[in-house]
Amino acid sequence: MVRLKVDKAAVDKKSRFALVALLTCNLRLMENWRRLQEQGWGVVVDHESTMILVAIQVIRAGGILNAEVDDDFHSLETRVPADRLRKCNLSSIAATTALNRETVRRKVQNLERAGFVVRDEDGGVRLHPGTLQKPEVMDALLSQLHNFVRTGNELMRGGVIRLATAIDER
């Protein structure tokens, strides 16, 4: 496995370069989420609401990154059964996003009216069924990955990150 390492000495010397590269990446990533909303739902929500949508997915599917997952669930084309996902509620969203709970409640209501999320009887919040299977989501995913790789390559060219060596692994 290839591992990357931050070169702290290079960051100290090239901190402005690293900051601009990461801020540029953040802008590209945010624009991709905006474009997905526009193309997939015909409506664009504010950045806090976008952060809430991202948080819902991270909270519910976060365990998938650290667990063995059936091959069937590796692709977004296949819906993961609800019982394989974590519960998500207003409090967990507030904790994840650092937004206050009342703001989260109000924005989740707006997201529900716009068709982005659904509320469960037990107070749970989840993305509207079929959301991740929209073709626009796969397009956004590919665009996000390209932006991530582009930024990584820029940071490597600038010497701010590098391939880790066996010495780094000790």
Image (cartoon, rainbow, N blue to C red):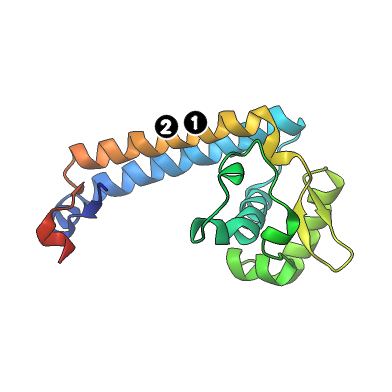
Q: Quadrant of residue 44?
A: top right
Residue at horizontal 68 percent and vertical 46 percent from the top: 46
Can you give x and y, in whole percent of width and height, for residue 131 in the image? 73, 40
Label 2: state its secondary structure: helix
Q: Are marks 1 and 2 in contact (CB under 8 Å)?
A: yes
Task: Please state if 141 lies on the left or on the right of 124 as rendered.
Answer: left
* Residue placed furthest toward the left: 167
Label 1 crowd (10 A; few <14 / some 14-19 / many >=20): some
Q: Which mark is residue 143?
A: 1
Marks 1 and 2 sit apart, C-alpha to C-alpha, by 5 Å
Label 2 crowd (10 A; few <14 / some 14-19 / many >=20): few
Q: Considering depth in this image, is 53 or 99 the residue closer to the camera?
A: 53
Q: Amino acid at mark 1?
A: Ser
Q: Is residue 67 above or below residue 45?
A: below
Residue at horizontal 40 percent and vertical 45 percent from the top: 23
The residue indicated by pointer 2 is 146
Can you give x and y, in whole percent of width and height, for residue 159 in the image? 16, 44
Q: Quadrant of residue 26?
A: top left
Q: Amino acid at mark 2?
A: His
Q: Is residue 153 above or below residue 80?
A: above
Q: Which quarter of the rendering shows the C terminus?
A: bottom left
Can you give x and y, in whole percent of width and height, for residue 117 in the image? 78, 50
Task: Please state if 145 lies on the left or on the right of 49 as rendered.
Answer: left
